Image: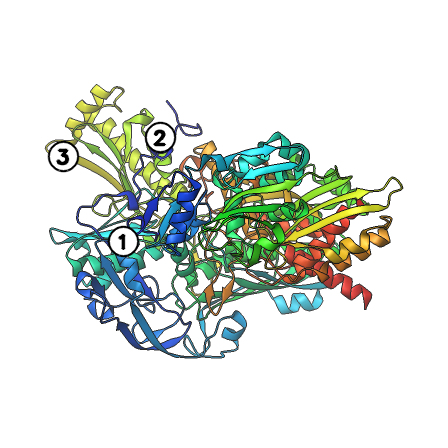
Amino acid sequence: MRSVGKNVSRREGPEKLTGRAVYLDDLDIPGCWHGVTVRSSVPHGRIKAVKFDPAFPWSDYVVVTAADIPGRNVVTLIEPDQPLLAEGLVRHREEPIALIAHADRAKAYEALKHVTVEYEKLPSVLTIADALAVKEKIYKDDNVFKSFLIRKGDVDQALASADVVIEGEYRVPHQEQAYIENNAVAAWEEDGVLVVRGSLQCPFYVVKALKVLLGRDESKVRVSQTVTGGGFGGKEEYPSMIAGHAALLALKARRPVKIVYDRHEDMAATTKRHPAVVRHRTGLTRDGRLVAQDVDVVMDGGAYATLSAVVLSRGTLHAAGAYECPNVRVRSRVVATHTPPNGAFRGFGAPQTLFAAELHWEKIADVLGIDSLALKRKNLFKIGSITATGQVLRESVGAKSCLDVVVRRSKYAQRRKEYDRWNADPKKPSWKGIGVSVCHHGAGFTGSGEVYLASRAGVALTRAGALVVLAASTEIGQGTNTMFAQVASDTLGVPLDWLEVETPDTHKVPDSGPTVASRTCMVVGGLVRRAALDLKAAFESEHGRVPRTRAELKKAAAALCGAKPARRFEVQYEKPSEVTWNDATYQGDAYGVYSYAAFAVELEIDRATAETKVLRVTTAQDIGKAIHPLFAEGQIIGGCLQGLGWALLEEPVYNDGVMVNSQLTNYVIPTSLDAPPFDVTVVEKPYSRGPFGAKGVGELPMDVPAPAVAAAVKHATGRLIATIPLTPERITAALAADAEAARV
Amino acid sequence: MRGDARSMTWTSPRTPAQAVRALAADPRALAFAGGTDLMVAWNMGLLNGRAVVDLSRLTPWRMIRASRDGLSIGSLATHAEILRHPAVRARFSLLADACATVGAAQIQNRGTLGGNLANASPAGDTFPALAVYEAVVHCLGPEGRRALPLLEFFAGVKKTRLKPGELIESVFLPSLPKPARAQFRKVGTRGAQAISKTMFAGALWLDRDGVVADVRLAFGSLAPTVRRLRAAEAFLKGRRLDAATSAEAAQLLDADVSPIDDIRSTRAYRLAASRGLLARFLAGR
C-alpha cells in the first residue's frame, strides 16, 4: 500500500513518452491567431517614432501598442518598474515595443520586417563596473536595485587579530535555462473571463499581473498550465510578460491569440541567471579555523528589478558557505544595467555565492599548506552550529555525512595521489584532477517569505468518490503530480491510484504559491499531507474509518458530501513555532531547514588543447527523505549536469547589450556524451516539519558542481582560475599567462 | 519556427540533367541533399519564398565505388554510409574518422558529403581529411562536366566555385601508399553536436632511415577555407623527425592559417591548440 519511498510510475510518463502530451503549441484552438513581438534594437534610447510601412496590408492584422493597455503598463512582480510594452524609452535590447497578430504565423513574422523603430540613442551601461561607477543613472542615484547587510560578531576586529587573512575574487557569468520547450502562451475571452493557458511555473503570478495590466477583477482572469517542457526558473516570472502580450492581442482581436517564441527569441529576450562578482576576505587561525568572513557580492540585475532583490537575498544568505564562523559580514548589491533583465534560475543566487565560498578554500589551502578537504571538515556545519544570521541548526544537518560518503566512494585520497603522479610525468598527454565541494541550500522561501505567501493546498472528495489533490504547484518535469499523489495516498492509507491531481488552474485550485525555491515537496507537499490528515479524520468521524474499497469509498463520499458535489479539505501554511526571522536586521532563521550536498568530480584535461573531459562524479545529497528515489536521483543528476555545463561550457556572449550566441548551436549545453558517469547517494536526515521528513532537492544539485570543477582544474593544472566557465580558451589563456610570467 | 513551407516550391527531378536544368532556370533555387544545414536556415525563416530542388531521387549519386586508382564517393552518400564503408575505413581512414565527428547520429544519417562541400563552412568537418587525400570534386552543370581539386573548389566563407546550375556529382580520392602515421582530430565545443574550433588531419610517410619522405598536413576552422600547411610540409620533407624539428614545424603553422576571434573561440586558443595537435602528431604520440 505505501508508495512513499518507492519508484512508482510517473503519472504523465506514458503521454510524454508516446508523444501524446499536448504542449501549448500543439493546442488546437479554433480561430486562433499568432502573435509576434516588435523588439528594441538599441540598449538604451528614446523612441522617436514607430513606423508602419504604409504599403503593407495592416488591415489584415491586429497591432497593439502601449496605448491599448486598459490598466497599468507594468509587469507586476515586486517593483512596478518594468513596462509590458516600452513607451518613450527603451532600457535594453529586445525590449517589447509593439505586438502584431495575424491568422497565419508566417505572415505575422513577415509583418515584423515592415515596422521600423527610430531612436535617439542614449549612452548605455552594460557592465557591473560601469553600473557601480554610475556612468549613467539607471535606477535611483546609485544604480542599486537592492542591497543587504548581514552582520555577526565583529569582523574588523577579528580580521585584525587573525593569524592569516586571505583575499580572493570570483566571477560567474549569465546562464540560460535552456528548457526544451520555449515560452508559449495562449489567451482568449470566454463569457467575460480572460482565459490564459501556457507553459508556466506560477499561474497565480500571471493572474496578479493581468489584474493590474487589464484593470479587471481577479475573478475575471483564469490561468491554467499546459504540459510544460521544463522551467528551471525561466518560466517563473517571464510568463507574466508574455501572457500580458497575448491577452492584449486577444482582447483587441476579439479572438484567441497564441504567442510561441522560437529559440532565438527566447534566448535573446528572456531572463538568465544573474552574473556576479564575489570578493572574500577571510581570517583564520594558522591551523585553519575560521575566525572572520568578510564577503562582498555584486550581481547584475539587468534593466528592471524583476526578482533581483529576492535572488540577491538568497545569494546573500548562502554567501558564507556551509561553515560556522564567529564573525561574518556579508554586503551585497544588485545593480541595474542596460541588458535584458536577469531572473530566476535553479539555485536563485546561491550557486553564484557558493561558487566563491567553496573555491576560496582552495586559495586558503595553498596559503596555509593544509588540504582544502581537511579545512572544510574542520569548519563544516553540524547540529548546533550558528549561521551568519544567528540561526541555530537544530536538526537534519547532513553536511558531514554527505562529505564522508563522497570522500569514501570517490576514493578521494587515493585519486589525489594517483593524479599527482600522473601530472608529474611530462610524457602523459593530459592532466588529471579531483575536486570536492560541499554546500547547503535553504528550502522554501527566504526569511518570512512563506508567511507572506500564506500558501493553501487541499484534497477534495467528490460525491462520486474521486479523491483530488488541489494545488497550484506545476509539474515541470520534476514529478510534482506523482509526488502529491504519493503523499496524499500514504497519508490517507489508500491505494495510490485512488488519487487524482487537479491541473493547476486558478479557477479550480487554491493559491499554493509559486513552483520555485525547492518548496513544492517540502512546503506544499506538507500542506497536502495536512489536508489529507483532515480528510482522514473526517472519514474516521463521519464514516467510522478510511474506506478500504472503491465501493466503500463511494458510500463514504456520499455520506461526507451530503448534498454538495464535493467537499474540499484545504489548509493554509503555518509558520513552525521555532522559526523566527527579522527582515530589518536580517537575523534569525533564514530558512526552516537546509538540504546539504557534497560532490567530487574527476576530470582530465588534454595538454595540447585544454579540452576537459569529466571522468566521474560522486555525489551525496541530504534531502531529508526521498519521496520518490528515482525522481530525486533524476533531479540530482540533471541539476548537477546543468551545473557542470555552467562550470565548463555555457557562456552567453553579450555584444552591445544583447546575447549574440542565442542559438543552441553556439550556446553550448552538455549533451549526453558530455555527461559523466554519476555515483549518487541519497542521504536522509529527516526534517520534522517536512512531509515524511522531506526537505528540498530541486536546486541543491546546481550549487555543488562549479566550485568542485574549478578545484579539480586547479589540481590538474596547478592554476586557480576564479572565473567560470572553465573553457579550453580560459584554461589556455591562464596557463599562457603563467608561462609568460615565469619567463619575465 | 519561422520557415513557411507554403511559400516555397519543391521539385524532385528524376535525372541529373533535369536537376541541373531546374537549378539553372532559377538562380535563387536551392539544391537539397540531406538538408541538415538548410533546415537550420529554414527554421530561421531565411528560405521563405525560395524554390527547392530535391536531389533525393538521384540514387546513383549515393554510390561509393572503390577501384585500384582510388575511391569515388557519390555526392549524396551520407556521412554514416561513408564512415561504415570498408574501403574508406581501410584506405582513407581520416575521412571515416571525420565523418564520425559530424553532428551526431541523426545528422550523420542525413547529411551528405556533397552537401557538406557545397555548404562550404570554414568548419566543414570532412575538409581537412579531403585536403590530405587531395580529393577531386567532380561537377555537373549546364556546360557539362568538370573536375576541381579540393583546394580550388572553395572560394571563401560559405562560397564555392560552383557555377549557376552546377551540382557536385562525386568526389574522387586518388589511391596513395599507406602512411606511416595518419591522424584526424576535431576540437569541438563539446562531445557531440559540436562545431569545430580547430580541426587537424595529417598523414606522414617515412623513408627506411626515418627521414620524412612525404607529409600532408591540413587544418580546418583556422582560415576562411581549409588549409594545407605548405610551409611546414616543405620544412619537414627530407628531415629526420626529432623533437627540435617537430617544434620548429609546429611554429610554421602561422604561415598558412589566419584564425579569428568569434563566438566559438579565440584566435589565440585556436593557434595554441593547433600547434599542440601538430606537435603531438609529429612526435607520434
Other-residue count near label 3 (Cα within 10 Å), few / some / many at <14 / 14–19 / ≥20: few
> Which amino acid type corresponds to the residue marked 1 in the rendered image?
Arg
Residue B92 at what x, y percent from top left?
A: 66, 38
| Residue at far front of view | B143
Q: Position of residue A677 (x, y in %)?
A: 59, 36
Closer to us: A257 or B226? B226
First of labels 3, 2 by sequence position? 2
Vertical side of A480 occupied by A345: above or below: below
Q: How many marks?
A: 3
Of circles 1 and 2, which is in front? 1
The quadrant the N terminus of chain A occupies is top left
Image quadrant where one finds the C terminus of chain A: bottom right
Alpha carbons under labels 3 and 2: distance apart: 31 Å
The residue to which callout 1 is attached is: A105
Q: Are marks 3 and 2 in contact (CB under 8 Å)?
A: no
Q: Nearer the viewer, residue B37 or A592?
A: B37
Assign a secondary structure to mark 1.
helix
Three-letter amino acid code of the residue under disc 2: Pro
Image disc number at residue A14: 2
In this rendering, the answer to whether A518 lies above or below A135 is above
Which residue is labeled 3 in the image?
Answer: A565
**Subunit under mark 1:** A
Tell me the element at label 2: helix
Identify the residue shown where x is 39% and y is 51%.
B42
Would residue A549 be found to the left or right of residue A646 on screen? Answer: left
State left or right for residue B74 relative to residue B202: left
Q: Are marks 1 and 3 on the same chain?
A: yes
Residue beneath the point at 51% across and 49% down: A441
